[in-house]
């Protein structure tokens, strides 16, 4: 399986690029889901798992945990919601297998470069609103960093009837 889809092909893609390798238009070595809320992330994980299965790549669930400046990163207590038994049980109930990555950071958007390779596929669950929501701000930050983002709004994503 190819690791990246090219935007151009053949000689045209190399024109004017002497000595340079072309950058992939879309990286397809994994599908990542960014944690927003438990329910929205589960819906995004369901969509992301279908895409990952179709591509034959792993699914990664990523949580950026912001650590306040007055707290040492080493002294942060608790676990990520992605690491709780209830969340893992709900994932398994949906038949989703995923790797979980938790990034402890002071600033979430500046950590994007550490969490994703260039041109990654990222799925985010959240609600659309007139005012920018946290999930929409994530979408804008990831798109600005050059990633392909799929926004999953659970209120718009209904189950299909099999009648």
Image (cartoon, rainbow, N blue to C red):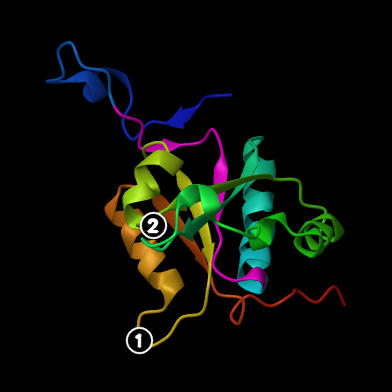
- The single residue placed furthest to the top in the displayed view is 19
Say which residue label 1 marks: 131
Q: Earlier in the sequence, mark 1 or mark 2?
A: 2
User: Residue at point 47% right, 50% down?
Assistant: 73
> Position of 117 compared to 89: left or right?
left
Residue 92 in the image, given as x and y percentages of width and height = 83, 55
Dot 1: what SS? loop
User: Residue at point 69% right, 59% down?
Assistant: 46
> Position of 149 compared to 161: left or right?
left
Asked where in the image residue 163 lies, by quadrant, the reply is bottom right
Contact between marks 1 and 2 (CB within 8 A): the answer is no
Residue 111 in the image, given as x and y percentages of width and height = 37, 48
Between circles 1 and 2, the one closer to the viewer is: 2
Say which residue label 2 marks: 108
**Residue 129, above or below 12:** below
> Position of 117 compared to 35: left or right?
left
User: Residue at point 62% right, 38% down?
Assistant: 55
- The single residue placed furthest to the bottom in the displayed view is 130
Q: Nearer the viewer, residue 49 or 145?
A: 145
User: Residue at point 61% right, 62% down?
Assistant: 44
Tell whether position 131 is magenta.
no
Residue 122 in the image, given as x and y percentages of width and height = 49, 52
Q: Nearer the viewer, residue 44 or 109?
A: 109
Q: Rate crowding at label 1 as few (under 14), some (14 to 19) or many (20 or more) other CA atoms within 10 Å.
A: few
**Residue 122, above or below 54:** below
Identify the magenta region: 23-38
Q: Rate crowding at label 2 as few (under 14), some (14 to 19) or many (20 or more) other CA atoms within 10 Å.
A: some
């Amino acid at each position: 399986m190819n690791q990246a889809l090219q935007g151009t092909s053949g000689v045209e893609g190399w024109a004017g690029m002497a000595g340079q390798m072309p950058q992939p238009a879309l990286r397809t070595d994994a599908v990542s889901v960014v944690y927003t809320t438990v329910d929205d992330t589960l819906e995004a994980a369901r969509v992301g798992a279908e895409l990952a299965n179709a591509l034959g790549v792993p699914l990664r669930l990523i949580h950026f945990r912001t650590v306040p400046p007055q707290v040492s990163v080493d002294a942060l207590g608790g676990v990520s919601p992605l690491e709780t038994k209830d969340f893992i049980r709900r994932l398994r109930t949906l038949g989703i297998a995923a790797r979980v990555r938790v990034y402890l950071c002071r600033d979430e958007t500046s950590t994007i470069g550490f969490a994703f390779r260039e041109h990654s596929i990222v799925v985010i669950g959240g609600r659309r609103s007139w005012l920018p929501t946290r999930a929409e701000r994530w979408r804008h930050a990831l798109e600005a960093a050059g990633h392909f983002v799929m926004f999953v709004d659970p209120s718009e994503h209904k189950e299909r009837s099999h009648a």
